[in-house]
Image: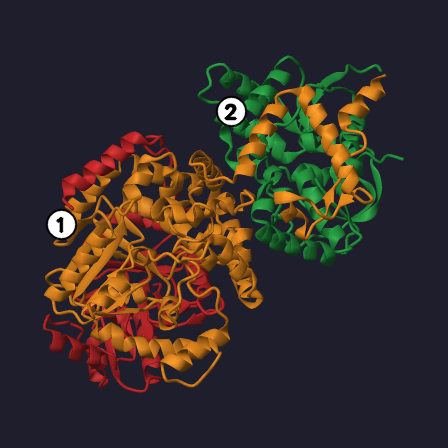
Chain colours: A orange, B red, C green
Amino acid sequence: MTVTKLTFYDRIDNALSHPEKQLAISAGAKAKYINRANAMAEFQDMEMTRQLARQVRANTLSKLDLYLEQFADNVETLGGKIFWAKDADECNNYIHQLAVRHNVKLIAKSKSMLTEEIDLNDSLGHANIEVVETDLGEFIVQLSNDRPSHIIAPVLHMTREDVGTIFNENLNVPFTTDPSELNTIAREHMRHIFLNADMGISGVNFGVAESGSICLVTNEGNGRLISTTPRIHVAIMGMERIVPTLTDLNTMLQLLARSATGQKLTVYNNIITGPKRTNELDGPDELHIIIIDNGRSNILASSLSEILYCIRCGACLNACPVFQSIGGHAYGSVYPGPVGSILSPLLFGNHFDPLPHASSLCGACKEVCPVDIDLPSLLIKLRTQNIQKGSAPLWMQISQWIYAVTICNPILFQIFLQLAQTITNRFSQKGWITKLPGPLKNWTNQRDFPALAQKSFRQMWSSNKE
Amino acid sequence: MQRNQFVKTVRRSINLNDLPTINSLPIKNKLGNITNRATLIKQFVHEANAVKCHTHLVNDHEIAMDTILNLLSDQPNKKYMSWDDKWLPIPNFNTILKNLKYEHCNNYIPQDREKRQSTYKHLEQACIGITGCSAGLADTGSIILESQAGQGRLCSLLVPIHVALITSNQIYPTMGSYLSDKSDNVTRSSNCNIITGPSRTSDITQTLTLGIHGPGTLHIVIIDN
Amino acid sequence: MSKTQQIVQLLVTCMIDAIAPNIGMSVKNILNRHQCEVQFQNSQTCCGQPAFNAGFIKQARTMARHTIDVFSKTTGPVVIPSGSCTDMIVHQYPEILKHDPIYKTKAEQLSKRTFEFTQFLVDYLKVEDVGAHYTGCAAYHPCCHGLRNLNIKRQPSILLNNTQSLKQVELDCAEECCGFGGLFSINMNKISESMLNKKMSHVIDSGANVLIANDLGCIIHMQGGLRRKGINIKVKHIAEIIDDCN
């Protein structure tokens, strides 16, 4: 993934200085949050299904090696090809070579965050192979040279006017802000791509070990088209994306749709079991499934492996008040929001270390997670790792030690309280302070801070007794 | 990377982490209540309408045929795609249409690149795609389509209007109940689609629009005799 | 004094101790009225939550052991007028000390006898009406940790519904975080401020003249923001509201 040079703080400032984008993001996320809540409210046995889904994920990861082998065996028996990719380069090279071998000039792609993670489009672009994003949101992102700001809704940050302008400037069509007209423009433009592409590339929502099937979930139908019309279908799957059985797949699909968009089921749950068979009419002649590690085995080995339960529904993004405030781009990663704050430092390194600190630990993410990932605890674990790496500012490290020593000694604690009381009283007016010194000044930018009470509770308690 | 090397890395990682090992799953999918057929049909129709399908509940295949002829008569041309008669609950369906001078677009797709693309060009002109179904799901208003010989995928994909025929005894309460009965059917062809409503997107400012890449209109004709 | 007295340990929290001791007094008064003998251990300090949340796990463990030592010597339920401190003791102590041979069991024992204040009143003492009386138009902000980790939702609502003269108004997006989050409010102050601004506009729109919450961190955060804006809405702890019995 290409990493920006701006720091996280710069990106936050940037995001907060565009109120119109902020409004679009928070309205969009809120709408999705409410849709999800409504869908879950009428879902009988929701909590039971959620816990079942969690167990399915735990079971899968605890025997992932066996399931991967079972999956691969089944795919190969069906005539599909499996390629095991250690990292982005191995994956991109395989696709590049395959495309060259088959003289592929045009590739139609359905939405896949994994291909964003490995920068597939750039890699193929350098080889002069045209890759067209077919998901409407991703298409808009591609036309405007932008980046997706949400894993489910790539253009959550855009207004209708933005989209109208992008189409007008890039597709030689009149400016319009009507979503259904914009829709028609995209449909017509994309038809040509679907019918002329030599290769279709998709991600994989789930791979089913028992049958060697892959499931692609789309509302638009582009996932079906790119896996039907081109002669070659390449599906790229993160190695954790396995479910053991079709029954387990069903559990996941029920939760995925409700969590992501509030639908009971996504429009097209496309289950692909091998390439087109001998007497079938249509479909690709070749199916290549690339199973990619790209850092996942390191996460699996760590104390943060629970994050691999994630099924990429985006519910934690929509629920997160921090995401609602700063939007997806500020995270600087293809994976934003709470899940991104955990995945990004693990997959992409130190540059993303500050992300786990951007959370009030309110727990709204855990509440909506369809597989009940304890995201706040994982955020705290990453904070702890950062502290152990020595990344906390010195003032914080020192003050935490002083605090710890003080706390464990009631007499010191009392002295500390009295000291703090005397100091805050000097700077306060009517019990409130408008300007704190040092690093604490960040509090008083927009908020007053209370002075300590004249008499602490323990003083009141002992004087009451006497 | 070699397969065994890849899998070995995964195995090593599993042994290092502190995740729980789960051997058997205590709870399974709910099957839904097998109530009487009338209730099931009612629920199916309700849910399908809720996801913006057009449902037509008819008593026999002749009325079903009339319903389809009506839809066809509204189209700008007489070209259509469909599954083979074998897979449709209306006897001699394609013969009837042939006699009425409708043109069936054959969606066998050849391997050769040029021929492939000219076939697509031809198929693109079809106004309606007519298919049967393997099953319907009452709790979500979904239909399940396979891709065996004679069941072209493109009939439910390339056309602006998709008409699916289903008989009432094909309706299951939930996907769980279908899987517990017919899970082999899901994987006996290269493609099985669980379709819930017409193609849609809300990518632009969360506004729902229909028919972005797949059919924007989905009719479900339910034959209950 | 015919009924037997229930001994209760008050863990007042370091913030209430230092900043708003009257909340602690209200808790004591209310418990006293319901046949509780309230004890206060002078050796109690801070539960360690700020350190834990910031990732200072070693310091958090040290503070946890201290708090466990303080209360291991006592009897009776431990009552805390704060959802987040209760969550720290109930859920995090057993977790962070699970490899500690001595403190593991002690942490689990303390976890079992620790209650948040409204939870203790309604679920443990089965008191739904404390005979409170408060004149005002109130909105309620459920603080995140209590709400999501301890499911504290029903209890405050029962107590407030039974408060005479209290008019309650709906707070839009009530369950959304106010942006406090401990060190987060200083470290990531711009995000925190943006969250607070949204919360404040919902509070203003609600028409309330008093905002009720049950965690002092969130209370001073929201009050500090409202004050700076010159908005005359008081933010109060639920104990202060229901202590008013005229």
Residue A274 lies left or right of residue A111; in this view the side is left
Cα separation between marks 2 and 1: 48 Å
Q: Which mark is residue A76?
A: 1
Q: Is residue A299 visible?
A: yes
Q: Quadrant of the C terminus of chain A?
A: top right
Q: Amino acid type of disc 2?
A: Pro
The one of C117 and C71 positioned closer to us in this rendering: C71
Residue at 21% x, 80% y is B121
Q: Which mark is residue C2?
A: none
Query: Quick check: do tags 2 and 1 share a chain?
Result: no
Q: Name above or below for residue A50 compared with residue C25.
A: below
Crowding at dot 2, Cα within 10 Å, few <14 / some 14-19 / many 20+, comes out as many
Q: Quadrant of residue B132?
A: bottom left
Q: Quadrant of the N terminus of chain A?
A: bottom left
Residue A390 lies left or right of residue C43; in this view the side is left
The one of B134 and C172 positioned closer to us in this rendering: C172
Residue A62 lies left or right of residue B204; in this view the side is left
Q: Secondary structure at mark 1?
A: helix
Question: Picture coordinates of residue B63 (x, y %)?
Answer: 34, 73
Crowding at dot 1, Cα within 10 Å, few <14 / some 14-19 / many 20+, comes out as some
Question: Picture coordinates of residue A457 (x, y %)?
Answer: 77, 27
Residue picked out by circle 2: C94
Residue at 58% x, 24% y is C63
The label nearer to you, 2 versus 1, is 2
Q: Amino acid type of disc 1?
A: Glu
Question: Picture coordinates of residue A315 (x, y %)?
Answer: 47, 52
Q: Secondary structure at mark 2?
A: helix
